[in-house]
Image (cartoon, rainbow, N blue to C red):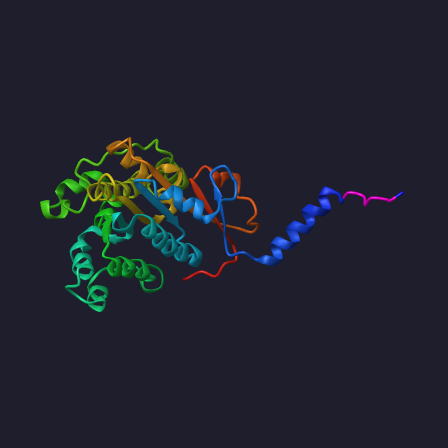
Amino acid sequence: MIKTAAPIPLFIISLFLLVSFKQDKPAYLLFSSKGKQVKYAKMINDLSGADMIFFGESHNNPIAHWLEYEVTRSLYQQVGKNLVMGAEMFEADNQLIMNEYLGGLIPADKFEAEARLWKNYKTDYKPLVTFAHDSGLVFIADNIPRRYASLVSKKGFEILDSLSDAAKAFIHPLPVPYDPEVRCYKDMLDMMGDTGTQHMSVNFPKAQAVKDATMAYFIYQNWQAGKHFLHFNGSYHSDRHEGIIWYLRQMDSALVIRNITVTDQEILSKPDSTVLEKADYIIVVPENMTKTY
C-alpha cells in the first residue's frame, strides 16, 4: 500500500508565503477600496474611463512620484491628446508662464526661474511638466495663490471681498461655498483643538477649503466631455472623495471620478482598514522607504 504524504498544515503555508513576501521586498503594492490586490493594468483600464482622476500623493514619497509619471504615460497611451494634466503644486497666476513654456515660447530654464516652484520640483514634478511639454498636452496651474489662502487662514473668507477683480480671477468665484461638516474640514477643526485662538481654529479649515474650491473650479473650467483630467495633489485634498472632489460634485454630480491615495505601512500585504475608505485605489509603500526630502 502506497502511503500518501500528510497535507501540509495551512499555518506552515502561510508562514512560507509571508517569509517569501518579506524576502521579495516589493517597493509597493496596489489595492482596491475593498482591500483586494489589483494589477496595475486593470487600474489603468478603469482610470481611462473616468472623467477625472485624482492622484493623492505623499509629497516626499519617491514611489508616489514615480507612479505619477507612470500613470501619466499609461493614460496617455490609452487616451492620447484627450489627457489633461493639472496639479496643486502650481498656482493659478502662473498659468500664463506655464502656457508659454508648454507652447515653446520660452525655454525650461526661464519657466523655472520665474514660476513659484516647490523645492522638490526638479526631482518630483519636472518629469510631469516635461511630459506634458513633449506630448503637447495642456497642464493646468489650478491652485489658489498661496498669499490669498494665507489671508483666509488669518481673517476668513470675508477678506477675499477686498481683493481686486484681477486678484479674484485666480480664485473660485465668490462667495466660496463651505460646509464645515464635510469630514475633511471637520477633522482639521478637531485636530486644532485648543491650540491657538478660536478665530484661528475656525479659519484653518477654511484656508484648506478655498484651495480645494479653487482647484475644483479651474479643473472643471478646463475639462469637457471626452477629456480625462489627471490631477496631482496631496492625498488630503481628495481622500474619501472629499476636498476637491466634494466641490466638483456640487458643480456636476454626473462626473465619473476615481481617486488614488498613498499610504506608508510596515506590512504591505494588507492595507490598514482605516485607509480602505479613502480611495478607489490604495498604493501601500514600505514605511522605511527613502524620502525625497
Q: Position of residue 7 (x, y in %)?
A: 77, 43
Residue placed most toward the observer, 133 or 285? 133
Which quadrant holds the N terminus?
top right
Q: Position of residue 83 (x, y in %)?
A: 27, 49
Residue 32 versus residue 126 in the image, above or below: above
Instruction: State how many labels appear.
Output: 0
Q: For the magenta stretch, what is the residue range?
A: 2-7
Q: Quadrant of residue 190?
A: top left
Q: Position of residue 266 (x, y in %)?
A: 56, 51
Q: Quadrant of residue 247?
A: top left
Residue 48 versus residue 186 in the image, above or below: below
User: Is 46 inside the magenta-drawn segment?
Assistant: no
Residue placed most toward the observer, 59 or 207? 59
Q: Is residue 92 left or right of residue 38?
A: left
Main SS of the magenta part reads: loop
Does residue 200 appear in the picture of this structure?
Answer: no
Residue at the farthest left position? 165
Q: Quadrant of residue 174?
A: top left
Residue at the farthest front position? 1
Q: Position of residue 283 (x, y in %)?
A: 46, 48
At a point 17% along the width and 63% down the height, the residue shown is 104
Residue placed most toward the observer, 89 or 160? 89
Which quadrant holds the C terminus?
bottom left
At a point 66% along the width and 54% down the height, the residue shown is 19
Residue placed most toward the observer, 220 or 119? 220
Does residue 9 appear in the picture of this structure?
Answer: yes
At a point 48% along the width and 39% down the height, the residue shown is 276
